Image (cartoon, rainbow, N blue to C red):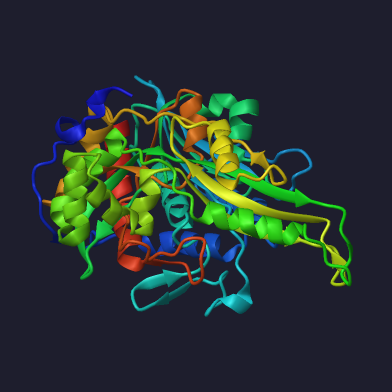
């Protein structure tokens, strides 16, 4: 990545200040239809245990056909022997394209949600107190619904003549390893659909202050890579009436505790440094001062300590590994023969799984604990924030949120963008949907998204896409 990602000039950031969220554009007769699409998507369970991506795909297909898309304009792609892992791609073709197309991508699968844990049915869309509640409301059926709604309206719009193709991909498998990843599968088996100049994806929104004012609009330019590791201890076991000194559960607990105290080396990337430079003065307070200090000196240990105390900013500063699953024993009256811990590691770009494995082994320091790479994913590089990308973003942001700066973001999560980046398609996370840090609780209980943020994101993304294809 060129240092021209040095983004002050590219981003054109000058105004520092807060603005209330702009009022969504009036007179939008299509909002009710969009809300129906969003509601339908949320209320179709597409979780891995109880749901089906294919049901979402078939619902989207019905809407696309009704809008005038023919069999030459779209394709339903279901991997062999995976009937619930369906995907759909569609295209509005430019009559005389002057450049490669734009891909609007979004995953339609969600993580599991148990009704008994939630305050509301997770697969019913509730609108309460200015929020939409439901599994996938924020991650990421809101943006997926925006893309589908936009494709339908552009197809039906008289006189719409794009300069380049507009391509839609609603795919499965982003959230779980036991599904076929749709983006990867399409790249391997139906690659012509992804012959595009760049892609717009999830991965960044906007940051709100404690009192709900827009502080920073974010654009994702890089992401950590999710690698899954396993710690395993095995021994002969035996009858529980004869406890042994070596116990697989105790050995595993000791190893897991060491991992809980492990802190990987800090890596302040160019993107993070620029994010801190822009965001620090706006946030103010202890966190804001620490951001500004790290932007000036990435080795400022006191400032780094402040940022590492916050889970969100800590996650962006270095590789992290956290225990997410435990399995041990085979009977209540038998000594355990096997005990395992699953570690979810979010790995910084440029760090290999083998390096993480070596660090874990050194930290644990016990040859009886086997460390394995269970799920390996290839890393990717950050895409360049060129004038072609940033021009429309800056122009529309200035209209909707005047005075609010734009900051590049390296997301601590992983997205399907890594597959496209490795295939040579620059991929950017962009939604225009603002929230307070952590309030959406994606993957957690009672996931939610601000109603106003969803509608503003819809307006913002439409304007940006139109600018890209005019």
- Across and down, in percent, residue 286 comes to 19, 60
- Quadrant assignment, res 95: top left
The residue lying at 32 percent from left, 46 percent from top is: 462
> Does 291 sit left or right of 417 as displayed?
left
- Quadrant assignment, res 93: top left
- From where the camera sits, is residue 267 visible? yes
Screen quadrant of the C terminus: top left
- Figure check: 247 above or below 371: below
> Does 108 sit left or right of 80 as displayed?
left
- Figure check: 149 above or below 212: above
In the image as oriented, which residue stretches furthest toward the right? 239
Q: Nearer the viewer, residue 58 or 329?
A: 329
The residue lying at 19 percent from left, 31 percent from top is: 10
- Figure check: 118 above or below 415: below
- Across and down, in percent, residue 263 comes to 44, 48
- Across and down, in percent, residue 407 comes to 23, 44
Screen quadrant of the N terminus: top left
- Across and down, in percent, residue 308 comes to 34, 54
- From where the camera sits, is residue 22 visible? no
- Figure check: 40 above or below 166: below
Q: Nearer the viewer, residue 468 or 312?
A: 312
């Amino acid at each position: 990545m060129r240092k021209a990602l040095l983004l002050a000039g590219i981003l054109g950031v000058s105004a520092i200040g807060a603005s209330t969220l702009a009022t969504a554009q009036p007179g939008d007769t299509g909002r009710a239809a969009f809300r129906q699409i969003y509601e339908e998507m949320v209320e179709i369970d597409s979780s891995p245990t109880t749901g089906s991506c294919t049901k979402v795909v078939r619902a989207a297909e019905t809407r696309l056909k009704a809008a005038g898309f023919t069999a030459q304009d779209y394709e339903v792609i279901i991997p062999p022997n995976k009937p619930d892992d369906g995907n759909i791609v569609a295209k509005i073709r430019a009559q005389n394209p002057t450049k490669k197309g734009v891909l609007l991508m979004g995953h339609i699968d969600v993580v599991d949600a148990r009704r008994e844990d939630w305050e509301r049915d997770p697969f019913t869309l509730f609108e309460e107190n200015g929020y939409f509640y439901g599994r996938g409301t924020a991650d990421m059926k809101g943006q997926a619904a925006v893309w589908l709604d936009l494709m339908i309206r552009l197809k039906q719009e008289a006189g719409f003549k794009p300069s380049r193709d507009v391509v839609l991909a609603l795919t499965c498998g982003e959230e779980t390893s036991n599904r076929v990843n749709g983006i990867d599968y399409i790249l391997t088996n139906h690659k012509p659909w992804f012959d595009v100049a760049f892609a717009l994806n999830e991965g960044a929104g906007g940051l709100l202050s404690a009192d709900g004012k827009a502080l920073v609009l974010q654009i994702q330019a890089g992401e950590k890579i999710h690698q899954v590791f396993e710690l395993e201890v095995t021994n002969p076991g035996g009858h529980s009436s004869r406890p042994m000194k070596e116990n697989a559960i105790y050995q595993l607990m000791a190893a897991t505790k060491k991992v809980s105290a492990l802190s990987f080396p800090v890596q302040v990337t160019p993107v993070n440094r620029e994010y801190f430079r822009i965001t620090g003065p706006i946030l103010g307070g202890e966190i804001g001062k620490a951001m500004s200090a790290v932007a000036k000196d990435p080795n400022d240990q006191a400032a780094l300590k402040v940022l590492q105390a916050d889970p969100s900013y800590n996650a962006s500063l270095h590789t992290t590994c956290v225990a997410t699953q435990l399995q041990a024993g085979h009977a209540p009256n038998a000594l355990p023969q096997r005990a395992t811990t699953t570690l979810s590691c979010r790995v910084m770009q440029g760090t290999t799984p083998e390096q993480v494995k070596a660090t874990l082994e050194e930290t644990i320091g016990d040859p009886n604990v086997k460390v394995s790479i269970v799920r390996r994913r290839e890393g990717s590089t950050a895409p360049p924030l060129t004038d072609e990308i940033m021009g429309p973003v800056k122009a529309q942001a200035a209209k909707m949120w005047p005075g609010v700066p734009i900051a590049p973001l390296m997301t601590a999560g992983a997205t399907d963008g890594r597959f496209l980046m490795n295939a040579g398609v620059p991929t950017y996370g962009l939604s225009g949907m603002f929230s307070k840090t952590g309030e959406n609780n994606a993957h957690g209980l009672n996931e939610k998204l601000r109603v106003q943020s969803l509608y503003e994101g819809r307006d913002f993304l439409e304007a940006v896409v139109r600018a890209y294809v005019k």
